[in-house]
Amino acid sequence: MIPIAKPYLTKEDAQAAYDTILTGWITQGPRVAEFEENFARYTGAKYAVAVSNCTTGLHLAMIVAGIQEGDEVICPSMSYIATANSIKYVGAKPVFAEVHQVTYNLNVEDVKQRITPRTKAILLVHQIGMPADIAAFRALCDEHHLILIEDAACAIGSSYQGKKIGSHSDLVCFSFHPRKVISTGDGGMVTTNNEAYYNRMKLLRQHGMSINDRVRHSSSKIMFEDHVEVGYNYRMTDIQAAVGIQQLAKLDWIVGERRKIAQRYAAELGDISFIRLPKENEGYVTNWQSYSIYLKPECPVKRNDLMQALLDIGIASRRGVMTAHRETAYQEECAGLSLPATEDACDNSIIIPLYVPMTDDEVTTVIKGIRSCLQV
């Protein structure tokens, strides 16, 4: 079976985790601080805050941005449900907007129509690693005095207008889940250029504690912490961070390898008239966290039938990116909501295998399998 994805973890990564375990410091500590410094430097952001996963990072972003009950946050429905859930965590309402069918990212023209006096922020998702048009949304936010938050769960290593994702906005949230380009098992990071946001997120991720463990344990004098506000246990461990440091050092190479695979898919599937392949616009560089194929109405094979046919010959695939407004948790409050572009993109696209290391033979097998199942 050729899987849809798998993490690229090496003996070097395992050794880093092993060495950290032997230090006796396995919760949030010096390796987390080092990972944060390296990550901020890589993205070009002033600060980075490591957290337990991207969802908790999004939650903290909502809190420090001042999003609260009664506010509205515009976001895509076509995203993993954690995007919308993070808005609900602070009592606000997710307002779902349409996406472009080629990039699967928010359609700025549709977003404009959904701004109300209650709108507080736009949560911009860089879907499947393809950068959204940050400048267009920044201009819209400035015009309406809104906060721009980026859900970059899939976008580590991607670039927009010559700068890495993570440096353009004051709140950008990343994931290190095993499906992502680099992984720490689980875990996340929030980058920011806002010092006040940075300091409060560090406080909130560790129970609102005024002095973190690393500072207290390294002090030559007795120190007593205070818990200055109700916080959370959203910490990353030093074991995870040790792996993350090694993974980050390989990131550009990993992205380069993924881009080679995507180039082969584009070159060898691009002649099939009844499918649409993702397109990378000028000034955008995607990490190809996922590769999605859209089946046009004239395609002779239905989406689910294609997925089953591929599975029957040993090739895994996944349905198009989910739509939160059609999930059971959101159906009641979204009754009557129609997002035709979003629903069409979800229902008629599949994600095909792309990972490192994926051999040339495996890529060839996937390409031949798709062409065979589509009878082209």
Image (tube, grey):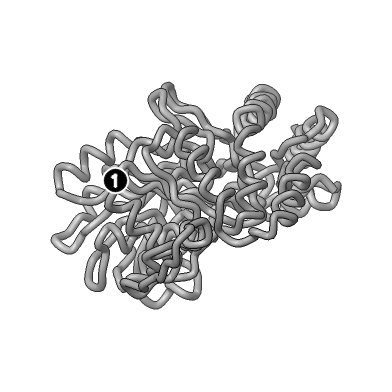
Residue in the foreground of this view, choosing between 50 and 88: 50
From what the image shows, is residue 60 above or below residue 135? below
Any part of residue 125 in sight = no
Element type where label 1 sits in the image: loop
State the residue at coordinates (55%, 59%): 28
Q: Is residue 18 above or below residue 46?
A: below
Q: Measuring 20% from the left and 51% from the top, which residue is drawn there?
A: 146
Mark 1 is surrounded, within 10 Å at the Cα level, by few (under 14), some (14 to 19) or many (20 or more) other residues, namely some
Relative to 84, residue 194 above or below: above
- Does residue 8 appear in the picture of this structure? yes
Q: Nearer the viewer, residue 300 or 206?
A: 206
- Residue on which disc 1 sits: 194
Q: In this image, 285 relative to 106: left or right?
A: right
Q: What kind of residue is marked 1?
A: Asn
Instruction: Tell me the quarter of the picture where residue 372 sits.
Output: top right
Q: How many marks?
A: 1
Q: Position of residue 226 (x, y in %)?
A: 36, 72
Is 21 in front, or is 165? Answer: 21
Whole-percent x, y for residue 10 in the image: 78, 41
Is 246 left, or right, of 192 in this rendering? right
For residue 174, above or below residue 232:
above
Q: What's the residue at 33%, 54% (across, down)?
A: 199
Indicate the quadrant containing the C terminus: top left, top right, bottom left or bottom right: top right
40 with respect to 24 (left or right): left
- The residue depicted at 41 percent of the width and 63 percent of the height is 211
The percent position of residue 46, horizontal first and vertical second, equals 37, 38
Which residue is situated farthest in the front direction here?
A: 221
Q: Position of residue 62 (x, y in %)?
A: 33, 61
